[in-house]
C-alpha cells in the first residue's frame, strides 16, 4: 500500500560510503557520455535537494518512486531499472500497464530493486545509469548526494512525494530531451479526461473527499492536488470545499485529521478510499465514528479492492490513465447511484 508518509528512504552508512567512493571516480564516465547525443541540449534541473546536470541524451534511465518509469516509457525510453512496487503488481511481478507497454515495444523489462526503507543503492549503481528520475519520491538528501555524484538525479522541487502530474511529466521530458513529446502527452491526457467528463455531465455537481487510514482511530484526507484526487477531479467531480481548509501534514500531500474529526466529511457526497487488506477494511468499517460519515452510511463509496487498480488510479501518467479510466467509471456510477434524490 502506498502511503506517502511511509516512503521516506534510508541507506546504510556503509553502502553510502561505497557509493561516494564510486561517485568520486565517475568523472571520466561523465566525460565520455557528454560526447554522445550531439543533438541533445544540456539542461540543468533544480530540486529541493540540489541540481541535476544532464549533458547528453540519456540512454540508461533508472526511476525511483512512482510514475516516472511510465512516463519515460511513453517518451521513448524503457528504463534499465525501476523501484519495485509489489503491492500493485500482477502475477508477472510488474505493474501490469508497465508490463504491457514494454512487451508492446518488444523491449526488456526493467530490472527491479528494493525501495522504501530498503532502497538498494548498490543495485542502482550496478545498472550504470546516466539519469535517475525521482521527482515523485521520498529520496533523502544523503541518498541524492551519493547518487548525484554518479549520475544526475532529478528530485522533487519542494517536498518529498509532492508534485502535480503535469509537473512530473514536464520535468521528465526536460531531463530526457523530450520536452515536446512531454507536452503532447500532457495534452493527450487532458483530452482523455475531457472526453470522460463530457460523457458524464451528472458528475459535475457531485462532491467528494479521498480518504485513507493507517489503522483503527486514524483518518487522513488527501489534498486537492494529490494525484489520485486530481484523477477524480479530472473526471468532473468536485472536491469537497472542506478539503481546502485542512492543513497539510508534512511529507504526505494530505491532512491527517484523526477519526475524531470525521464529521468534517459530512458534506461529501462521495467518499473515495482504499484499504491495505481485508482485515484493515473490517477493522475500519467496524468503527462507529467511521460509519457515521454520511457517504459511508449510505454506501456512496468508491473503495476498490484490486491492488493494481488502486495503484493505477493513484498515478496520472500516459500509461495509467487509459488503463484506469475504463475501470473507474463503472465504480463511480454505482456510488453516484446511491445518492438520495
Image (spheres, rainbow, N blue to C red):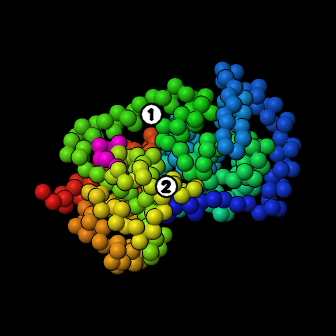
From the image, which quarter does the C terminus lie in?
A: bottom left
Vertical placement of residue 273 versus 233, above or below: below
Vertical placement of residue 215 versus 83, above or below: below
Nearer-N-terminus badge (1/2): 1
Q: CA distance from mark 1 to mark 2?
A: 29 Å
Q: Residue at left 24%, top 59%?
A: 335
Residue under label 2, please give it: 247
Which quadrant holds residue 76? Answer: top right
Label 1 crowd (10 A; few <14 / some 14-19 / many >=20): many
**In this orientation, which residue lies closer to the viewer: 330 or 296?**
296
The magenta segment is 234-239
Under tag 2, what secondary structure? loop
Residue 43 visible in this rendered orientation of the protein:
yes
Which quadrant holds residue 266? Answer: bottom left
Vertical placement of residue 71 versus 244, above or below: above
Q: State the image coordinates of residue 129 (x, y, percent, origin top left).
A: 70, 43
Q: Residue at left 45%, top 46%?
A: 225
- In the picture, measured across the screen, residue 77 lies left or right of residue 320, that is right
Residue under label 1, please give it: 186
Amino acid at each position: 500500500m502506498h502511503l506517502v508518509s511511509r516512503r521516506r528512504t534510508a541507506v546504510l552508512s556503509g553502502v553510502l560510503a561505497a557509493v561516494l567512493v564510486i561517485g568520486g571516480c565517475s568523472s571520466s564516465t561523465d566525460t565520455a557520455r557528454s560526447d554522445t547525443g550531439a543533438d541533445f541540449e544540456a539542461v540543468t534541473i533544480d530540486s529541493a535537494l540540489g541540481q541535476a546536470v544532464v549533458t547528453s541524451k540519456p540512454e540508461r534511465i533508472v526511476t525511483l518512486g512512482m510514475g516516472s518509469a511510465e512516463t519515460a516509457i511513453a517518451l521513448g525510453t524503457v528504463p534499465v531499472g525501476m523501484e519495485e512496487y509489489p503491492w500493485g503488481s500482477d502475477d508477472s511481478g510488474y505493474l501490469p500497464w508497465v508490463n504491457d507497454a514494454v512487451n508492446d515495444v518488444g523491449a526488456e523489462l526493467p530490472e527491479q530493486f528494493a525501495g522504501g526503507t530498503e532502497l538498494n543503492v548498490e543495485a542502482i549503481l550496478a545498472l550504470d545509469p546516466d539519469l535517475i528520475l525521482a521527482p515523485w519520491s521520498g529520496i533523502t538528501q544523503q541518498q541524492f548526494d551519493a547518487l548525484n555524484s554518479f549520475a544526475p538525479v532529478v528530485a522533487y522541487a519542494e517536498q518529498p512525494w509532492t508534485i502535480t502530474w503535469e509537473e512530473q511529466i514536464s520535468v521528465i521530458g526536460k531531463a530526457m530531451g523530450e520536452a515536446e513529446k512531454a507536452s503532447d502527452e500532457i495534452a493527450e491526457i487532458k483530452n482523455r479526461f475531457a472526453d470522460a467528463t463530457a460523457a458524464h455531465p451528472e458528475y459535475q455537481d457531485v462532491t467528494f473527499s479521498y480518504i485513507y487510514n493507517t489503522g483503527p482511530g486514524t483518518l487522513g484526507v488527501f489534498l486537492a492536488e494529490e494525484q489520485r484526487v486530481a484523477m477524480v477531479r479530472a473526471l468532473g467531480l468536485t472536491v469537497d470545499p472542506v478539503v481546502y481548509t485542512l492543513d497539510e501534514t508534512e511529507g504526505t500531500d494530505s491532512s491527517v485529521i484523526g477519526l475524531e474529526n470525521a464529521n468534517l466529511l459530512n458534506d461529501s457526497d462521495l467518499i473515495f478510499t482504499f484499504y491495505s487488506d481485508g482485515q484493515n477494511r473490517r477493522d475500519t468499517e467496524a468503527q462507529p465514528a467511521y460509519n457515521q460519515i454520511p457517504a459511508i452510511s449510505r454506501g456512496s463509496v468508491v473503495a476498490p479492492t484490486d491492488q493494481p487498480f488502486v495503484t493505477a488510479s493513484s498515478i496520472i501518467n500516459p500509461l495509467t490513465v487509459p488503463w484506469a479510466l475504463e475501470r473507474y467509471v463503472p465504480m463511480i456510477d454505482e456510488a453516484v447511484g446511491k445518492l438520495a434524490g
